[in-house]
Image: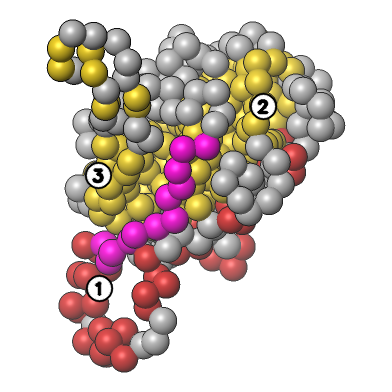
Amino acid sequence: MTTKVQGATFRYSHTIGRGEEAGTGFKNPVSVARGEGDLMYVVSRAYDYRSDSKRITVCTVGEDYIGEIGNAGRLGGEMMDSGESDAPGSMVWPTSVALDKAGNVYVSDEWLNRIAMFSSDGEWLGAWGTQGDADGEVDQPAGIAFDSEDNLYVVDTGNNRIQKFTKDGQFLAKWGQQGSGDGEFDMPWGIGLDADNNVYIADWRNDRIQKFAPDGSFLMAFGESGPEDGQFNRPADVAVDKEGLIYVADWRNDRVQVFDAEGRFITEIIGDATLSKWGITKLDANPDMKMQRDIAQGLEREKFLRGPMGVVVDDQDQVFIVDSQRNRIQIYRKIPPFFVGLYDGGRL
């Protein structure tokens, strides 16, 4: 049998979000996680001048707003603790979000050097983490991801290593050091796992992706600095779908690149955004704002990605791109590859 698999293609679905300090929008979003059913959790890192904008927004893929988790957040109508940085639920530099098998929400915080834990409905469960470079200590933790056994991998950015913990913070393993060789890192940031629990790391300053076995053994690396196909300019995140395709949020090149399981370039996504339902609702309620948009120049550039910081692919082949500098999530659907060729003695 002779077959040829055509490169995967992606169809734009819709956009969620707009720039908002609270409520139906995001402020400098940096990470997204898919939850049970239609739920999604979006980290707004915000900016230092509005600390109350740092939060986890809970919404649906269909753009229904559910509530907020974290600093000054509201979920189910109840106000959560806020104020001092060490208060329960507070965030300073939230960086990544992941869910365990029970649906509990884990958030890494670069400034506080901890992993915060919330229940699926926003209840504060506690936090773990201590700043340092000993086993189990962290320095500017960034990307986090759970494996199939509910162990949590943490990108320990300041220490240029990866650490593995139980979900309650018990140290299990580590690997990596500063450098540019195999298994070395220079400010690693994002993380993704495949179906076999292999670990993929967005090696930010080395402009590459590295792949490791679950025990930290080096498997492969791909990428180099530049703007061309297969090159990166500060890769921020990486995800792997159920077929093994690899997605990289290429931050400074304003795109997401897609690769096969061997690290060979397939295609790129540069953005096709339309106004979100939340954005349309705001314009309908503010005629002056709508009029200004109608006469504005250069809005055709608004559809493109700008500084994407995160990418996630769910089990329905939906691709979620965290379009950070435009305060939104762009969603695409992967179109299954088709086959051309003939089966020996008959039609394929």
Residue sitting at x 27%, y 87%: 294
Considering depth in this image, is 329 or 55 the residue closer to the camera?
A: 329
Give the spatial CA distance, label 2 vs label 3. 33 Å
Mark 3 nearby-residue class (10 Å; few <14, some 14–19, many ≥20): some
Farthest-out residue, front: 345
| First to last magenta residue range | 265-276
- In this view, which residue lies farthest toward the right? 179
Chain-order first, disc 1 or disc 2: 2
- Identify residue for label 2: 221
Report the mark closest to the observer, 1 or 2. 2
The x, y position of residue 245, in whole percent, is 44, 28
Q: Label 1, on which residue?
A: 282
Give, as a three-letter code, the residue at label 1: Lys
Residue type (three-letter) at the residue carrying disc 3: Val
Q: Left or right? Give the position of 260 relative to 330.
A: right
- Residue reaching furthest left? 347
Which residue, given by chain and number where applicable, does mark 3 sit on?
61
User: In the picture, residue 206 is in which quadrant?
Assistant: top right
Q: Earlier in the sequence, mark 1 or mark 3?
A: 3
